[in-house]
């Protein structure tokens, strides 16, 4: 993906900068992968689903956790609220209300996490849509069960 992105130095630099910035997020890695799986499922990028499934497994998520994340949810109600909001940020951002944000706070999510959520969604949207536009798919050697 990065090699193909390099056709546009501006895009590549933006991707690298956002990717580095989101690594400083306070979201736990397991939750970040759950959110990435939910967003990539919605976008339907096989390449990204492959990568995030492998990353989720490496982070210790179970197959059940991965399947639920791809459905946009979690067994943990607090996580489920954040994952669902991530999908809404992607799919229907204009319908998000102050009450929705208050609901995240009621689940114990900090303003920092709430503010970082659109960044993670944007990073996933960028990679997923770029890969689809570029026609990037996992090769047979890279393919694992997703």
Image: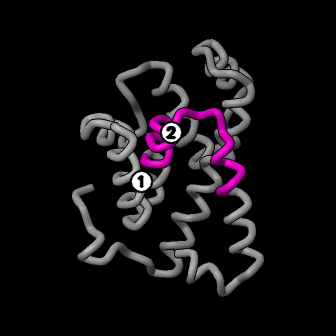
Residue 139 numbered tag: none
Q: Which residue is mark 1?
A: 52
Mark sitting earlier along the chain (1/2): 2
Secondary structure at badge 1 equals helix
Q: Residue furthest bottom?
A: 7
Q: Which residue is mark 2?
A: 29
Q: Position of residue 102 (x, y in %)?
A: 69, 18
The residue lying toward the viewer, choosing from 141 and 105, is: 141
Secondary structure at badge 2 equals helix
Q: Is residue 60 left or right of residue 2?
A: left
Residue 104 lies, with reference to residue 26, above or below; the image says above
Segment colored magenta = 19-37
Quadrant of the drawing holding the C terminus: bottom left
- Which circle, 1 or 2, is nearer the viewer? 2
Marks 1 and 2, how far apart at CA: 11 Å
| Category of crowding for the residue at label 2, using alpha-carbon neighbours closer than 10 angstroms: few (below 14), some (14–19), many (at least 20) | some
- Chief SS of the magenta region: helix
Residue 46 lies, with reference to residue 136, above or below; the image says above
Q: How is the image coloured?
A: one colour
Query: Which residue: 24% across, 62% down?
Result: 144
Q: Is residue 113 left or right of residue 57?
A: right
* Magenta-drawn stretch contains 33: yes
Residue 97 lies, with reference to residue 105, above or below; the image says below
State yes or no: discs 1 and 2 in contact (Cβ < 8 Å).
no
The residue lying toward the viewer, choosing from 96 and 8, is: 8
Query: Which residue: 49% across, 48% down?
Result: 36
Query: Which residue: 77% across, 76% down?
Result: 10
Q: Position of residue 37 (x, y in %)?
A: 43, 48
Query: Which residue: 52% across, 40% down?
Result: 32
């Amino acid at each position: 993906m990065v090699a193909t992105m390099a056709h546009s130095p501006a895009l590549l630099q933006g991707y690298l900068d956002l990717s580095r910035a989101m690594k400083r997020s306070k979201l736990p890695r397991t939750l970040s992968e759950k959110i990435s799986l939910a967003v990539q499922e919605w976008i339907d990028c096989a390449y990204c689903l492959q990568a995030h499934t492998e990353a989720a497994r490496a982070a210790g998520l179970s197959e059940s956790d991965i399947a639920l994340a791809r459905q946009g949810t979690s067994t943990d109600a607090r996580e489920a609220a954040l994952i669902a909001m991530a999908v809404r940020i992607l799919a229907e951002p204009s319908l998000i209300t102050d009450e929705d944000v208050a609901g995240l706070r009621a689940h114990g999510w900090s303003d920092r996490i709430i503010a970082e959520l659109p960044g993670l969604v944007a990073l996933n949207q960028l990679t997923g849509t770029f890969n689809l536009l570029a026609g990037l798919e996992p090769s047979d050697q890279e393919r694992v069960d997703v």
